[in-house]
Image (cartoon, rainbow, N blue to C red):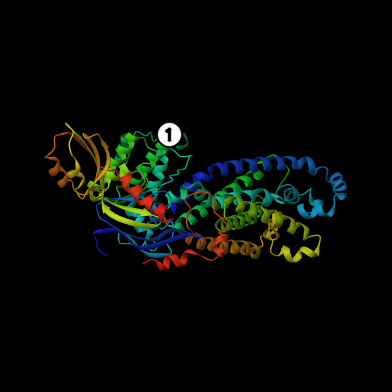
């Protein structure tokens, strides 16, 4: 396998009884990239990540993580990776410090505690407090720290910002960007579109156990629809605008206002508008949420 | 494995202290009471003569109540497997599955620890904890001998604890195996508890009726020696108990290696797996 590939998945199949969680997942994650794994609840995100760590075993397909087969070399994968589970549970009888010391011991005591304390400071969590006294968000911060504290070369993160307030979400995203800058590969699942949009370079959209598409985030956004709102300074004949092939009329306000849907590039529309007295022009880029919902809507229709 | 052992010992700390203090105080009380009862052997024998045969079958020969072996055998060791048996059942069923049901096992196994290291690190911690509990209980019997007339050999007094420890290990192994075979820790603990109580009754009743003799051969408590061990341990029985425990542990290890770690919660019986799998065809038809 190519050394530049951190994760290689081909035809991954996993069932729980009669429920088919994965129906042939295919994806490749390059070393050093931030890869988003986007899908609704039950799409197979967690199942895929847990297969990578050999917590569960697929019934079919090929899976290689850092060149290793998880079912053969799971310890080698775990040594070189950091994992944040989607449903993080910690020993309530320990303090944050105690839990992190335990996880460090499992790794052979390799952690730089100065770095750990720095992470705790940035995430504003008191490691001395018993975990049972921590809020859900603070427990999640402990989870983030345990995933990052040994500076792994691969981060496998299942909804890493779950339960964090927006400021802390941003801080975690910053930490992940820093990890990437240090050479780590980040594979994270999420159903928060803005998070994926702001962090990932490429994204796989999974639905019903199959990866529907893997695209660059930028390309995904650009390929999608835009809404354009135009206000003219005087009433105009806008028929020539509506005749452009990539334009569709969504709404109008007398002869001074238009709401258009534009597919693809804006070039033709802008050149045409140059002949009009445009008072204001506003474009709205669709969020990934809209794109995602479009996929999911199709799913529902198929069902 | 050392880290797992060390941290599991920390988790057992409360149980070691709880069980240890309880059994220490019980021993202290019973040995202290020995003097009072030993002086009234005749009156006691008259009283015990009216006790039903079934009663003596469970608790031993009451005519020896005036001897240290008889007193400790009846008042302490006769029911100790039933009492201390609760510890291996709770500890064994919780050894791996309580972490799985609470969702913690997912994170622990996300770190570089093998399933074998996790199982055996925790198993050895459980065995070490049960040995410590037995030792504290033994000290509870030995300490009051300094002011009591009971003059049992303290070295020989360890031998019934060896037999007891073998039973504890066996029930721990049964509990671990059941926890990995049945859908939940609750069901496993209940089943192991039923086995323990059934074993106690089968072994007891087998002494007064031939009907249960065959069943008693498969009852773990048949091979428990109580104070008889002070006259010499039955190494065949001991090896048998530990041998079966090792087989159960190896089978548990095999099951744990193949286990699908749950994210949390209790499992199911997976009875639906017995039904035809409709999705197979759909998978195969995918391009």
Judge whether B25 appears above or below A153 on screen. above
- Badge 1 crowding class, 10 Å Cα cut-off, few under 14, some 14 to 19, many 20 or more, is some
Which residue is nearer to you in this view: B73 or A43?
A43
Query: Residue B89: horizontal and vertical position, in percent?
Result: 61, 51
Q: For the N terminus of chain B, give its image quadrant.
A: bottom left
SS label for mark 1 = loop
Residue drawn where x is 81% and y is 60% of the image: B208
Left or right: B35 in relation to A6: right
Which picture quadrant has residue A99? top left
Residue drawn where x is 50% and y is 64% of the image: B278
Judge whether B241 appears above or below B94 on screen. below
Q: For the C terminus of chain B, give its image quadrant.
A: bottom left
- The answer to whether any part of residue B186 appears in the image is yes
Q: Chain of mark 1?
A: A
Which residue is nearer to you in this view: A238 or B126?
A238
The residue wearing badge 1 is A129
């Amino acid at each position: 396998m190519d050394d530049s590939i951190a994760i290689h998945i081909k035809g991954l199949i996993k069932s729980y009884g009669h429920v088919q969680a994965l129906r042939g997942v295919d994806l490749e994650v390059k070393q050093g990239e931030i890869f988003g794994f986007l899908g609704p609840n039950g799409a197979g995100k967690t199942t895929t990540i847990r297969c990578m760590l050999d917590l569960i075993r697929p019934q079919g397909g090929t899976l290689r993580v850092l060149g290793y087969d998880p079912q053969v070399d799971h310890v080698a994968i775990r040594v070189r990776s950091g994992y944040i589970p989607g449903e993080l549970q910690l020993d309530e009888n320990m303090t944050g410090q105690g839990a992190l010391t335990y996880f460090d011991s499992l790794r052979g005591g390799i952690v730089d505690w100065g770095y750990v304390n720095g992470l705790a400071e940035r995430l504003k969590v008191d490691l001395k407090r018993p975990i049972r006294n921590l809020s859900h968000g603070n427990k999640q911060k402990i989870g983030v720290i345990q995933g990052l504290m040994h500076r792994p070369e691969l981060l496998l993160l299942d909804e890493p910002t779950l339960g964090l307030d927006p400021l802390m979400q941003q801080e975690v995203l910053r930490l992940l960007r820093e990890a990437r800058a240090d050479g780590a590969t980040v594979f994270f699942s999420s159903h928060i579109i803005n998070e994926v949009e702001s962090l990932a370079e490429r994204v796989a959209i999974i639905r019903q156990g199959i990866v529907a598409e893997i695209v660059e985030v930028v390309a995904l956004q650009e390929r999608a629809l835009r809404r354009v709102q135009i206000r003219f300074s005087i009433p105009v004949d806008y028929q020539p605008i509506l005749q452009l092939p990539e334009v569709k009329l969504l709404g109008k306000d007398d002869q001074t206002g238009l709401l258009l849907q534009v597919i693809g590039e804006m070039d033709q529309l802008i050149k045409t508008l140059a002949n009009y007295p445009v008072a204001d022009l506003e474009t709205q880029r669709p969020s990934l949420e809209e794109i995602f919902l479009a996929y999911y809507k199709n799913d529902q229709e198929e069902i | 494995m050392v880290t797992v052992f060390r941290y599991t010992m920390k988790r057992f700390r409360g149980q070691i202290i709880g069980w240890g203090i309880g059994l220490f105080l019980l021993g202290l009380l019973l040995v202290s009471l020995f003097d009072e009862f030993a002086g009234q052997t005749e009156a006691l024998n008259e009283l015990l003569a009216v006790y039903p045969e079934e009663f003596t079958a469970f608790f031993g020969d009451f005519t020896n109540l005036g001897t240290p072996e008889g007193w400790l055998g009846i008042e302490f060791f006769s029911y100790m497997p039933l009492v201390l048996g609760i510890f291996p059942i709770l500890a064994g069923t919780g050894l791996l599955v309580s972490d799985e049901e609470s969702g913690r096992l997912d994170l622990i196994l996300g770190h570089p620890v093998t399933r074998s290291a996790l199982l055996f690190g925790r198993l050895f911690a459980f065995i070490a904890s049960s040995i410590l509990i037995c030792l504290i209980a033994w000290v509870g019997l030995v300490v009051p001998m300094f002011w009591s007339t009971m003059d049992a050999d303290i070295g020989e007094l360890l031998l019934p604890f060896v037999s007891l420890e073998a039973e504890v290990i066996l029930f721990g192994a049964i509990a671990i195996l059941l926890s990995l075979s049945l859908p939940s820790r609750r069901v496993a603990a209940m089943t192991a508890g039923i086995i323990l109580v059934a074993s106690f009754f089968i072994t007891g009743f087998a002494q007064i009726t031939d009907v249960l003799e065959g069943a008693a051969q498969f009852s773990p408590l048949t091979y428990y020696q109580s104070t008889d061990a002070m006259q010499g341990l039955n190494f065949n029985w001991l090896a048998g108990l530990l041998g079966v425990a090792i087989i159960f542990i190896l089978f548990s290890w095999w099951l744990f290696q193949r286990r699908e770690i749950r994210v949390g919660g209790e499992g199911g019986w997976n009875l639906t797996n017995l039904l035809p799998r409709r999705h197979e065809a759909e998978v195969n038809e995918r391009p």
